[in-house]
Amino acid sequence: MSASEPSAAESEDAGHPGARGAGRTPLVAGNWKMYKTEAQAESYIQGLLPRLSSVERVDVAICVPFTDLRAMVDSTRGSRVEVFAQNMHEEAEGAFTGEISAPMLSEIDVYGVVLGHSERRALFGETDRALAQKVPAALAAGLTPILCVGETEEERDGGDTERKLRHQVHEDLAAVAPGDLQRVVIAYEPIWAIGTGRVATPEQAQEAIAFIRALLSDRSVAPAGDPEIAARVRILYGGSVKPENAQELLALPDVDGALVGGASLAPESFAAIVAAAEKALA
Ligand code: 13P
């Protein structure tokens, strides 16, 4: 083999859509859910920012209630923390009492938005049909969507995990323009692992996320599908991520970060997960 030829390991890596060579920067995002008043959010961020001062290779986001957005955008300016909303309506404006639109979020410098979280699907009737409009609407407004997908315990036990993931990926990304797919972040959140303390095994997380990446490279499933684009999409794991289990999960080849619920609510534990993500890169 000549010096210019890649080694077997390198060429295998380059052909593997999950290869870190695709340059995916890990993202650790804290989903606060319906926690923290503005005053509590301010106190939290003052505790978090100094704890992130040595972070260099991991992107950090907080996904906060609407009422905290403006204060968190102001308080995180110049830091590496990006601020996300937790939901939005698919239309830009209209007679939709109680809703918030993508242009409203982007105008106040919100970075992105969580879409299709299982709590919104299960408790608030969020549908794949609405998500098919929400994802492109977020992108059109310059927001980064974090699209959540995942199976119930019943679906996993019934061998239906792949069918569920294929359905959600197919439906929710159906209207994403070619070239925009790599701006979407996907979070694989098995519903049975959310808020339960039960975490997917590394094998389960890697297998499901590699499956999602394979779906993204398939044009018949994701319209913009292409192996090269799929290799650039960040796919996070979510569900009972804690400082103790983060490093093992984040070291998996296709896992590009975490969407953290409960353990993101204290700056100490959230910063420890970010630190684990940096260590996992080593
Ligand atoms: P937990 O980390 O509390 O299980 O929540 C996960 C989640 O739903 C993040 O969006």
Image (tube, helix red, strand yellow):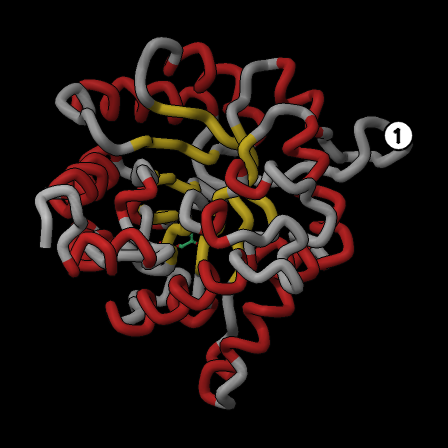
For badge 1, the amino acid type reads Gly
Figure check: 47 above or below 181: above
Residue drawn at 55 percent across, 49 percent down: 147
Figure check: 177 above or below 74: below
Rendering quarter of residue 206:
bottom left
Rendering quarter of residue 266:
top left
Quadrant showing the C terminus: top left
Quadrant showing the N terminus: bottom left
Nearest the viewer among 173 and 191 is 173
Q: Is residue 139 left or right of residue 45?
A: right
Residue drawn at 33 percent across, 43 percent down: 22
Q: Position of residue 241 (x, y in %)?
A: 28, 55
How many residues crowd mark 1 within 10 Å: few (<14), some (14–19), many (20+)?
few
Regarding residue 244, the answer to whether it shows in the image is no
Residue drawn at 32 percent across, 48 percent down: 256
| Residue positioned most to the bottom | 158
Nearest the viewer among 31 and 4 is 4
Q: Position of residue 204 (x, y in %)?
A: 32, 73
Q: Which residue is mark 1?
A: 94
Q: Position of residue 263 (x, y in %)?
A: 29, 47
Q: Position of residue 106 (x, y in %)?
A: 62, 20
The quarter of the image that holds ligand 1 is: bottom left
